[in-house]
Image (spheres, coloured by chain):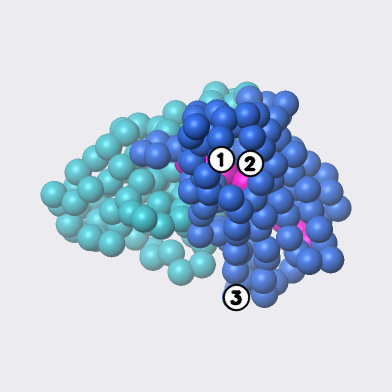
Chain colours: A blue, B cyan
Amino acid sequence: QVQLQQWGAGLLKPSETLSLTCAVYGGSFSGYYWSWIRQPPGKGLEWIGEINHSGSTNYNPSLKSRVTISVDTSKNQFSLKLSSVTAADTAVYYCASFPGYCSGGSCYGGYWGQGTLVTVSS
Amino acid sequence: DIVMTQTPLSLSVTPGQPASISCKSSQSLLHSDGKTYLYWYLQKPGQSPQLLIYEVSSRFSGVPDRFSGSGSGTDFTLKISRVEAEDVGVYYCMQGIHLRTFGQGTKLEIK
């Protein structure tokens, strides 16, 4: 059973850099895109970006200038950095794997972390 | 950027009755590999989202067969044949053909 465990600072001041890490336990690290998604309080899901095991990244154009996603395959971990945060970046941040699919009677991917609330306030 | 538009944004359903959610994309989600990269997620209250349907109509692990997905190109539908109390939450469609974009979400509640 694959589990994603995420951690990072939950309270930031404006202009600081958000930093979160997600560890993947119990399964293969290759074959997926490892993503970050956020959800402002009471609102919907926003995809931030993703990385694969070889380090290839894709970013949401609206956040690209402030986002860096990196991977440490030796630890089966990937990380998010979001610079120059403001109150608008206050959200629950999730790590997740894409895609999810089933083949040969087994299903793969579709994993999500537990979410981390990050609050930006002076 | 691909925009995903869901309707309705909320619905209230009596247990045992059907429910349907529409999702429209601003561009075709049909890839040259023949697959259509449209997914459906359910976020139950206080939980992380969970995958229900992948590639338009394939149910993911453990998803009851009362859930079904259909559609093609730019128009997609999630149907619940008989709503149960455990189905409450917010349903999101997501495209995966060009980066990823979620719809606004549809909140399902029980009457």
- The residue tagged 1 is A12
Q: Position of residue B54 (x, y in %)?
A: 55, 52
Same chain check for tags 2 and 1: yes
| Range covered by the magenta-colored residues | A30-39
Q: Of residues A2 and B77, which is closer to you in this image?
A: A2
Magenta stretch holds residue B14? no
Q: Secondary structure at mark 1?
A: strand
Could you tell me which residue is drawn at 52 percent across and 52 percent down?
Answer: A116
Q: Earlier in the sequence, mark 2 or mark 1?
A: 1
Rendered view: A78 above or below A18: below
Rendered view: A66 above or below B19: above
B34 to the left or right of B25: right
Name the chain under label 3.
A
Q: Which is more foreground, mark 1 or mark 3?
A: 1
- The residue tagged 2 is A18
Q: Which mark is on residue B78?
A: none
Any part of residue A42 in sight:
yes
Number of other residues with Cα within 10 Å of mark 2, as a class: few under 14, some 14 to 19, many 20 or more: many
Query: As shown in the figure, which amino acid type bears the numbered disc 2?
Result: Leu
- The residue tagged 3 is A1
Q: Secondary structure at mark 3?
A: loop
